[in-house]
Image (cartoon, rainbow, N blue to C red):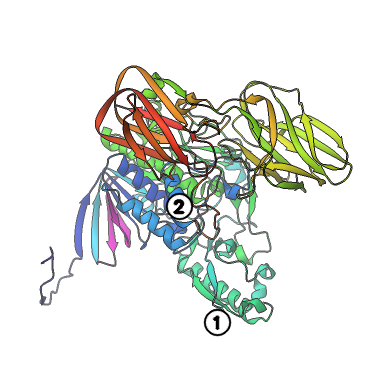
């Protein structure tokens, strides 16, 4: 069958004295996004699902940017490897969907498989035109403040694209569109005086973060020789940390193989790349041929990055520029659209050649808001700026720059563009209070989380209904059926408390000798934080030697508002604490990890890190509670929060309920076209995309199999193999019902059935 545009058997064209133009295609859309890293990808998917036509131009053969198989950096955000106090802080919305899907298909962390997940998500959206290997090369403007089109060229099909739209988004990393359009930008570090940022770096430390290139190794079971290329670094002692190299560490665990912080990280990227290649091959030569690593004999160098992972270059100016204080003080913004929680993470400009530590990281006590006004140019009227070029100071950029934080914020750009395209609004118009409220609502509807904001959605018909359930959890016991852990470090149980008196509790311990057991009841100084920085009460017990000793805890403490408290069993290696194998939505066990002790007067607080051991560890304490803990009510499914924050914010069924069911009743019949459910995919799990494997491909708290029934018991919809957070059910025709039942048939693990949110719309 003859294909359209099929080349004839013979093509002959006479000499032309004029320059031949390239094959040129014009594409009209509602939004042009340049840059297909995680930020650009999530913005494109969000906009497309909101109903507008999107062109996504990516200058690489795959999507994902630094998270792709070309660079292979793990994608992280507010969870920070679960090594801070930001509990249940994994980003929501499209990026959560991507991470959960990658976990389901790729818990081993294969970067090539992650490529396929991203590509599939994009090509499955009919509203997205994806242009891979297509680099933006020039910008045209209709006036000094308005972009008319972007010209891009694909080297693979020798085609030039003229991309026209009313709205543009630069997610390119270096800001190629924003730069050419004339938008104001910065490069380097602001002084301490400009924004009052006490952590602003000195000239000695440097003003830019560098690039990194990683390598992977493979054991092939027989001796392998390595002859280094001529350009390999021949003096390994030029790297002050050379003694840190070994055969067990590869991939992005070598993030500190970094260079370029004193160069132009836009125009000298190729120079930086060559220096990093010299380092990588010099390091491998040292490992293979120095004689200090006999276990390297059968290792081969399986992969070396072809392009560097770039951290920092230009930052463009929006109507708001985030600063250190926004992060550390967790400042509020009326136009908050997402959140961050990575440390302020700055690196010495000399990178791998520096005598200084590879990074200088300082955390806030909780997550912080990202304002929408940081996501568009203050100069170019129809230009969004997202990804690492977003509006932030160098210090704030040290936190906002990580990929999941940027992807989370970029979803607001996709949604704002949809609002703008449909209503004839420009990016700055969306920042008006009445417009930004609609933006926040629509982001939360699709699973986004905005700290300090609840979904206020009058269109959700569940808010007009009576919500009951077949059962609810009243937590009176976590059974003593788990391992026993030696208190080499303090161990804590997070418990959601209602306003009132803390209930009495009983834990069980073994004492190898006569011992003193100390316990503390703690809470966070901010209700929505999870840093146990306030000690409310201390209890002490003198225990004789012996196993299976019950210890009764009566803290006699009033709690002024619903919030999490921390029952902390302090260090004593002679004592073992009994744990429970029962896992529950909204409950976490923690261990003391370390103190954050910053230098004096850098604008950062001192506090302790209490972090959850990763599964299969991290069991809850075995304990009894009297009176039982409540707060797992069915009404939580429409309270506007779809993850634990100060409360559980979920309906959790009784563990003994054989047919857990939510029951939604209206006084009069309702016409319902779609239903959205949000389940527990463990927002506390970091879900690193590469290098670090995971014990599960599905989260044990997630609902796997459920049915929607009407009041007559007829099945309206059934999903038998869910692993995702957000499930959206659309009926072919609206259903008229006065009762909706959500019947949970099975969960992915042994945890009781749990639902965070239920939305019903006409």
In magenta stretch: residue 273:
no
Do we see residue 598 in this rendering? no
Q: Position of residue 439 (x, y in %)?
A: 38, 33
Q: Nearer the viewer, residue 4 or 231?
A: 4
Q: Quadrant of residue 117?
A: bottom left
Please identify the quadrant where the N terminus is shown: bottom left
Label ID, residue 104: 2
In magenta stretch: residue 154:
yes
Query: Which residue is label 1 attached to?
Result: 228
Tell me which residue sits at (55%, 56%) in the image.
208
The answer for how far apart the CA atoms under marks 1 and 2 are is 39 Å
- Regarding mark 2 in the picture, which secondary structure is present there? helix
Q: On screen, 330 above or below 597?
A: above
Q: Position of residue 219 (x, y in %)?
A: 56, 75
Q: On screen, 642 above or below 721?
A: above
Tell me which residue sits at (70%, 44%) in the image.
591
Q: Position of residue 142 (x, y in %)?
A: 25, 45
Q: Earlier in the sequence, mark 1 or mark 2?
A: 2
Do we see residue 666 in this rendering? yes
Please identify the quadrant where the C terminus is shown: top left
Q: Position of residue 538 (x, y in %)?
A: 79, 31
Chief secondary structure of the magenta portion: strand
Dots 1, 2 in contact, CB < 8 A: no
Q: Bounds of the magenta span? A: 128-157
Label ID, residue 152: none
């Amino acid at each position: 069958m003859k294909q359209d545009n099929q080349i004839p058997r013979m093509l002959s064209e006479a000499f032309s004295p004029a320059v031949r133009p390239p094959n040129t295609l014009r594409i009209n859309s509602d939004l042009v996004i340049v840059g297909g890293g995680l930020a650009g990808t999530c913005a494109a998917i969000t906009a497309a699902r909101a109903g507008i036509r999107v062109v996504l131009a990516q200058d690489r053969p795959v999507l994902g940017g630094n998270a792709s198989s070309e660079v292979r950096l793990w994608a992280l955000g507010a969870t920070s490897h679960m090594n801070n106090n930001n509990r249940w802080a994994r980003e929501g919305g499209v990026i959560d969907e991507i991470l959960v899907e990658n976990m389901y298909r790729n818990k081993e962390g294969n970067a090539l498989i992650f490529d396929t997940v991203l590509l599939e998500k994009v090509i499955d959206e009919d509203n997205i035109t994806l242009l891979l290997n297509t680099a933006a090369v020039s910008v045209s403007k209709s006036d000094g403040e308005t972009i008319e089109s972007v010209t891009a060229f694909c080297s693979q099909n020798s085609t030039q694209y003229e991309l026209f739209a009313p709205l543009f988004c630069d997610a390119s990393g270096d800001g190629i569109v924003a730069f050419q359009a004339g938008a104001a930008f910065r490069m380097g570090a602001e002084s301490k005086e400009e924004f009052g940022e006490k952590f602003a770096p000195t000239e000695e430390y440097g003003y830019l973060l560098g690039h990194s290139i990683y390598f992977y190794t493979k054991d092939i079971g027989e001796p392998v020789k390595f002859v280094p290329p001529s350009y390999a670094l021949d003096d390994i002692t030029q790297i002050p940390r050379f003694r840190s190299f070994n055969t067990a560490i590869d991939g992005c665990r070598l993030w500190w193989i970094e260079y370029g912080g004193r160069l132009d990280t836009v125009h000298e990227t190729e120079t930086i790349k060559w220096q990093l290649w010299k380092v990588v091959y010099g390091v491998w030569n040292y490992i293979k041929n120095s004689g200090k690593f006999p276990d390297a004999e059968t290792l081969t160098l399986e992969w070396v990055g072809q392009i560097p992972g770039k951290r920092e270059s230009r930052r463009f100016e929006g109507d708001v520029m985030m600063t250190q204080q926004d992060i550390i003080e967790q400042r509020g913004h009326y136009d908050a659209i997402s959140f961050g929680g990575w440390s302020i993470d700055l690196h010495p400009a000399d990178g791998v050649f520096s005598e200084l530590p590879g990074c200088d990281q300082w955390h806030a006590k909780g997550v912080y808001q990202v304002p929408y006004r940081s996501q568009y140019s203050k100069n170019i009227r129809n230009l969004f700026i997202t990804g690492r070029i977003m509006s932030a100071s160098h210090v704030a950029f040290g936190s906002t720059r990580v990929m999941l934080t940027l992807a989370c914020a970029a979803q607001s750009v996709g949604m704002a563009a949809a609002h703008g395209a449909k209503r004839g609004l420009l990016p700055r118009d969306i920042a008006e209070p009445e417009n930004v409220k609609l933006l926040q609502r629509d982001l939360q509807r699709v699973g986004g989380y905005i700290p300090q904001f609840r979904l206020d959605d009058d269109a959700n018909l569940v808010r007009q209904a009576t919500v009951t359930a077949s059962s609810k959890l009243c937590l009176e016991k976590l059974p003593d059926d788990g391992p026993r852990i030696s208190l080499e470090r303090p161990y804590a149980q997070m418990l959601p408390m209602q306003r009132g008196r803390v209930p009495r509790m009983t834990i069980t311990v073994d004492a190898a000798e006569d011992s003193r057991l100390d316990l503390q009841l703690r809470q966070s100084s901010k209700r929505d934080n999870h840093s146990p920085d306030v000690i409310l009460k201390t209890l002490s017990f003198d225990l004789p030697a012996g196993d299976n000793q019950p210890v009764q805890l009566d803290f006699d403490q009033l709690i002024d508002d619903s919030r999490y408290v921390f029952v902390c069993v302090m260090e004593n290696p002679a004592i073992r604490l009994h744990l429970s194998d029962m896992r529950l939505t909204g409950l976490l066990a923690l261990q003391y990890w370390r103190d954050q002790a910053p230098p004096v007067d850098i604008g950062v607080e001192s506090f302790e890190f209490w972090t959850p051991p990763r599964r299969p560890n991290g069991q809850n304490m075995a304990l009894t509670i009297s009176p039982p803990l409540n707060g797992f009510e069915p009404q939580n499914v429409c309270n506007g929060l779809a993850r634990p924050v100060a409360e559980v914010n979920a309906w959790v069924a009784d563990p003994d309920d054989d047919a857990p069911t939510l029951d939604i009743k209206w006084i009069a019949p309702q016409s319902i076209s779609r239903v959205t459910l949000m389940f527990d995919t463990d927002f506390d799990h970091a879900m690193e995309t590469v290098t670090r494997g995971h014990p599960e491909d599905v989260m044990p708290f997630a609902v796997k199999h459920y049915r929607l029934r009407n009041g007559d018991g007829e099945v309206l919809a059934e999903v038998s193999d869910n692993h995702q957070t957000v499930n959206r059910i659309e009926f072919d025709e609206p259903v008229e019902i006065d009762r909706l039942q959500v019947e949970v048939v099975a969960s992915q693990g042994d945890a009781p059935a749990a639902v965070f949110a239920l939305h019903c719309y006409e």
